[in-house]
Amino acid sequence: MSDVRSAWKDTGERFAALGGSLKAHYDEQHDVDDEKTKQELGESAKRFAGALQDAVEALGAAAKDPAVKDDVRKVGTSLAGALS
């Protein structure tokens, strides 16, 4: 069980890192020099990362539900069929 929790935690951390990367690219493309704008973008990135972390944690909790596991299997089967 701790492996699953660790995997979801890692996923959340990767989403947070992605948010930081996206912010850096935005700053670079828009040449943001205004300190207030930088601060607002930083806060937005933190909120985004927090929301992603919350979503990942919710998915982790849902993954423990047998009905959700069954739904995921069905989606996977359906997706595999569509891709083939």
Image: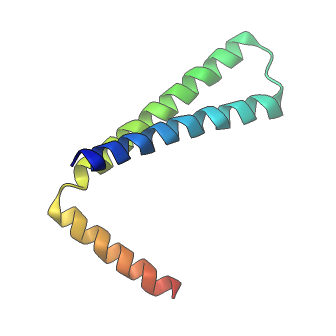
What x and y, as percent, mark residue 30? Answer: 81, 30
Which residue is most to the front?
Answer: 3
Residue at the image position 17 percent from the left and 65 percent from the top: 67
Q: How is the structure coloured here?
A: rainbow
Using residue 75 as the reference point, say whether residue 24 is left or right of it.
Answer: right
- Horizontally, is 1 left or right of 33 in the view? left
**Compared with residue 63, is residue 37 higher up or lower down, i.e. above or below?**
above
**Quarter of image, res 19:** top right
Query: What residue is shown at x 48% (from left), y 84% (from top)?
Result: 82
Please state the horizontal and vertical placement of residue 12, each as a whole percent of the image. Answer: 43, 40
- Whether 2 is drawn above or below 17: the answer is below
Image height of 76 relative to 57, above or below = below
The residue at the point 25 percent across, 56 percent down is 63
For the image shown, how many numbered marks are present on the structure?
0
Going by the image, does 47 lie left or right of 28?
A: left
User: Where does residue 59 sit, x and y in percent of width and height?
Assistant: 31, 50
Q: Residue furthest top?
A: 35
Nearest the camera: 9 or 40? 9
Residue 61 picture location, percent across and down: 23, 47
Q: Residue at x 23, y 63 (%)?
A: 68
Q: Is residue 67 left or right of residue 51?
A: left
Residue closest to the far left: 66
Quarter residue 38 falls in: top right
Instruction: State the residue in front, 1 or 57.
Output: 1
